[in-house]
Structure formats: C-alpha cells, structure tokens
C-alpha cells in the first residue's frame, strides 16, 4: 500500500460509519482523523487541524454537514479545502445546495467499494493539483 500523505478529516454522527470509513481510507494510504459531528469538526479546525480534505454527512444533530460546509467556506483559512459529501440524501435539492455551497464531490449511501475508490482517486488528483499550485 502506497502512503499518500494526505490528511482526511471524516465527520459523521454515526460512530460505526466513522470506523468503517476510517478503516477504508487508512487501508488506502490516507492519514485519517475522525470527529463525531459538525460542531466538533468546526472546533477542531479552529483549533488548528489542517486536513487536506473533509469527508462529511449532511444529516447530523446541532449543525448539519451543509452548515459546516458553508461555515468553513466562509473562513478564508479553509476556503480552499476540498469536501466529499457522503450522505443518504439523494434529493436533487440537497445536491444542488451542496454544489452551490462549494462541495467538491458528492456520493450517495449506500455505495459500492468501487464507487468510493473512484472518489478517492479524484481526491488524490484534487490534492495533487492543489499542492502543485502552492
């Protein structure tokens, strides 16, 4: 397995899914950090966390994933971060709202291992382009 040196922050309120995603990303060479819920993720970012990408769900208590996305996009320090929305919300309105808010990619649960791998490959390309531009 190739070490990618890409830091992924995974945000979800479901601890089982956090563990599953964490394992999948770690097995693909990513440096993984997890946070239960959007509020804690925002706190983590404001405290100095520097992920290369954020993976998040939409439906979470206290602050939705879309609210987190908008809050992060509003902060110039984090405006460049790519986001992968991983959610059961397949309604067109949610996808449009996420795109307008600046999501980089969107995947609907449940999904296959191949679908996630395809998204991971796109993440790699996004991060490589981002790092080349620095």
Image (spheres, rainbow, N blue to C red):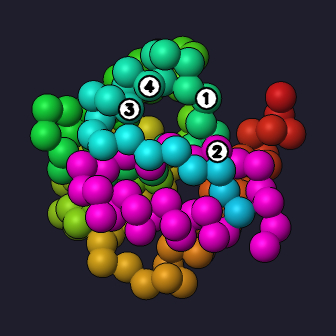
Q: Residue 122 occupies which quadrant of the picture?
A: bottom right
Q: Earlier in the sequence, mark 1 or mark 4?
A: 4
Pointer 2 with pointer 1, Cβ within 8 A: yes
Q: Earlier in the sequence, mark 2 or mark 1?
A: 2
Q: Secondary structure at mark 4?
A: helix
Q: Which residue matches tag 1?
A: 50
Q: Which residue matches tag 3?
A: 41
Q: Is residue 131 above or below residue 116?
A: above
Going 49% across and 82% down the picture, which residue do you hit? 113
Going 61% across and 62% down the picture, which residue do you hit? 26
Density class for disc 1 (Cα within 10 Å; few <14, some 14-19, many ≥20) is: some
Which percent across, then down, holds residue 42? 37, 25
Please say whether residue 112 is visible from this viewpoint: yes
Q: Secondary structure at mark 1?
A: loop
Q: Which mark is residue 7?
A: 2
* In the foreground, 17 or 123: 17
Q: State how far apart marks 3 and 4 are (Cα).
A: 5 Å
* In the foreground, 37 or 107: 37
Which percent across, then down, holds residue 77? 57, 16
Density class for disc 2 (Cα within 10 Å; few <14, some 14-19, many ≥20) is: many
Q: Is 60 positioned to the left or the right of 17 in the image?
A: left
Report the label total: 4
Q: Which residues are magenta?
A: 1-28
Density class for disc 4 (Cα within 10 Å; few <14, some 14-19, many ≥20) is: some
Quarter of the image where the N terminus is located: bottom right
Q: Residue 109 occupies which quadrant of the picture?
A: bottom left
Pointer 3 with pointer 4, Cβ within 8 A: yes
Pointer 3 with pointer 1, Cβ within 8 A: no
Q: Is 117 positioned to the left or the right of 92 in the image?
A: right
Q: Which residue matches tag 4?
A: 44
């Amino acid at each position: 397995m190739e070490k990618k040196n890409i830091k992924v922050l995974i945000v979800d309120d479901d601890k089982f899914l956090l563990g599953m995603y964490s394992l999948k990303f770690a097995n693909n060479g990513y440096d993984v950090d997890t946070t239960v819920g959007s509020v804690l993720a925002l706190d983590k970012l404001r405290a100095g966390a520097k992920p290369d990408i954020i993976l998040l769900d939409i439906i979470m208590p206290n602050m939705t994933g879309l609210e987190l996305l908008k809050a992060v996009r509003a902060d110039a320090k984090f405006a460049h971060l790519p986001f992968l929305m991983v959610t059961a919300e397949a309604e067109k309105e949610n996808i449009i709202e996420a795109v307008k808010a600046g999501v980089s990619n969107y995947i609907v649960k449940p999904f296959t291992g191949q679908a996630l791998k395809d998204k991971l490959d796109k993440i790699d390309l996004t991060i490589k382009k981002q790092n080349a531009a620095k």
